[in-house]
Image: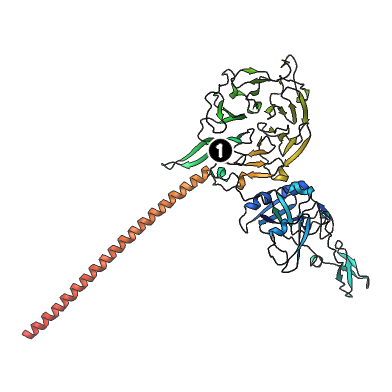
Amino acid sequence: MISVAVKIETECGTCRMPMPVNTLAREVGCPSCGRPAALGVDLWQALLRDPLYNGPRLLPNEVRRSAAGKLSAAYIRRAPACQGCEKAIPASSIQAVVDQAMLRCDRCAVQTRVRRVPPELAGALPDITHLVGEEPDRLAGAPAPQAEPATFPCPQCGSPVAFDGVSRACVCRFCSASVHVPDEFVYRGRRRVVAHWYLCFAPSIVVRTPAAQAVAAGLFDWEGLPEAAVDAEGNLYCAATQSRWYLDQAGRTQHKIDRVLWSMDPSLGIRWLQRDRPDEVRSLGCAKDTLLVIDAGGAPPLRLASATGAPLESAGAVAPSIELSLIEQGCLSYDHDGSLLFQKDGKLQRIGADGAAMPVWTNGAARDDTGERSYWSLTSLADHPVTLSSLASTSIYCGPDGSLYLLDANLLARFERGGRKVYCVEIGGGSADRPRGAVGADRDGNAYVIRSDRLVRVGATGNESVILHVERDALPRSDMSIAVCPDGSFWLFGKEGLAWKFDPRCKLLFASEKEPRSKNPTMDEVFQQHVENVMEMANVRANACQEDLLRVHGELTRREKASKSFINKISWVLTILLILAFFAYENCS
């Protein structure tokens, strides 16, 4: 069983004092002033998103932190233990608890509370079965411990003075003296401390590293937003432009641009990869077993086998008379039947896989209602629209069920495959800076719309709900795009290699920035490294020259000493010979 120990703390909104949150509850009381603080499900979900994702992947004794609003959490991967003596609690004892129980330690007799996740908070803790080591709370059905009355000795007569813990100014009931209770005394022995409590994962959860191979391979090293699409099986197709700086053999700083196209399966494994593509990809689309690739170079759309990425030789090319490369990227979408729907010259048009023109709508006559009429808002569009003369900036998206979604500023309209208008709703929040890739849909007719600070889900009948928010869920405020899977899970893409995958309940499944990767150096870093290498080589050569000079100097010094020693020896020999000759001469005389 995998478990993660968390310590959570917040600030009281009344007295501004630190307030420990030692239980999973919708309301906790401040130990200083006693005022309650509400903790909603959305806040818990945002706070515990990182512990749920990173916790099972942590190394022993590795500590991480996360925050949401005023809540802050520190978490570590650790087995549940007794709060009194730190003895490990058997996993079998925890898993045997059906509702809630108090497990008594056989070493120190301290009781540890164990309970299942309450239904109203189960959405905030997916894949968690039990909570261990919490403090009792009223909402969970456990009685709260009764606090003893606090007293402070009167500095004049010594009698105990009772106080409520809020007001520091009291009056002694015996001598009527004014008493000021210091904060140090108030919090001594009364103030609760932040304690560890444990999140126990389901036995089916195992330690895994999603897409670590893809991240390590550099597939998430793009600078701008990538182009992405998802097929009916949930496989992801992504095209991105990557760049890196390096030094050539002559020592010059060079800039390398690589255009990649790759696919990943729903389990985040790499299916196939293409590098060094000649042109940048402007749009991707999926239909059946075919992947449509529209390049920015103006060539006819390329159709690839979605399973292997190999070109399909039998697929016909789109008619050359339709220059899809000139159509804005947000004004073109690939339908599930293999046809292309796009907006050109203020009108909706549809072409088949062979390039032949097709009716925009399957039911009802596709009327030409240009005339003198102009549509200034999506609300003015009726069933089976064709003309969008004044809505040239409208984004187009074809859902997996054949529905057509039109997004213009803060309005989203949905039309069935036959052309009937289902709804036109106003989306809250500021509009996205870039309409391309700002809308997606699943097979149930739920639309997902990116705004400047949130992700909104619009139901099949037009009801809205904010499922992710920048401040609550730590998403970037920069441009983002979305690719929605048929089952309701979805991918979000940001600049600088950022990518996230969420399940239909908005549980984080993958985050590219959380996986280890090698950093691509910038031009300045490459140049600085080149300068450091040159200086290092110069230092090596200087040190080598210095060593050579020292060696030569040492050799010359050695030879000079040897020469002086030889001369000294000769001098001594000559001196001795002269002395012997002198004595011989004297003897002869």
- Residue at 40% of width from left, 51% of height from top? 538
Using the rendered image of the protein, determine whether residue 457 is visible from the camera's viewpoint.
yes
Residue 161: percent from left, percent from top: 89, 70
The residue identified by callout 1 is 271
Residue 271: percent from left, percent from top: 56, 38
Q: Name the residue type under label 1.
A: Arg
Using the rendered image of the protein, determine whether residue 8 is visible from the camera's viewpoint.
no
Residue 376: percent from left, percent from top: 75, 23
Q: Left or right of 585: which side holds 172?
A: right
Q: Secondary structure at mark 1?
A: strand
Q: Quadrant of the N terminus?
A: bottom right
Q: Tell which of 278 and 495 is nearer to you.
A: 278
Figure quadrant of residue 32: bottom right
Figure quadrant of residue 457: top right
Residue at the outermost left position: 589
- Residue at 73% of width from left, 45% of height from top? 472
Q: Quadrant of the C terminus?
A: bottom left
Does 296 sit above or below residue 144?
above
Q: Left or right of 578: which side holds 406?
A: right
Q: Tell which of 399 and 548 is nearer to you.
A: 399
Residue 82: percent from left, percent from top: 71, 64
Q: Callout 1 environment at 10 Å: few (<14), some (14 to 19), or many (20+)? A: some
Q: Tell which of 196 and 309 is nearer to you.
A: 309
Q: How is the image coloured?
A: rainbow
| Total numbered labels placed on residues in the image | 1
Q: Left or right of 161: which side holds 379?
A: left
Q: Tell which of 538 and 37 is nearer to you.
A: 37
Does 288 sit above or below residue 49?
above
Does 305 sit above or below residue 167?
above
- Residue at 64% of width from left, 36% of height from top? 234
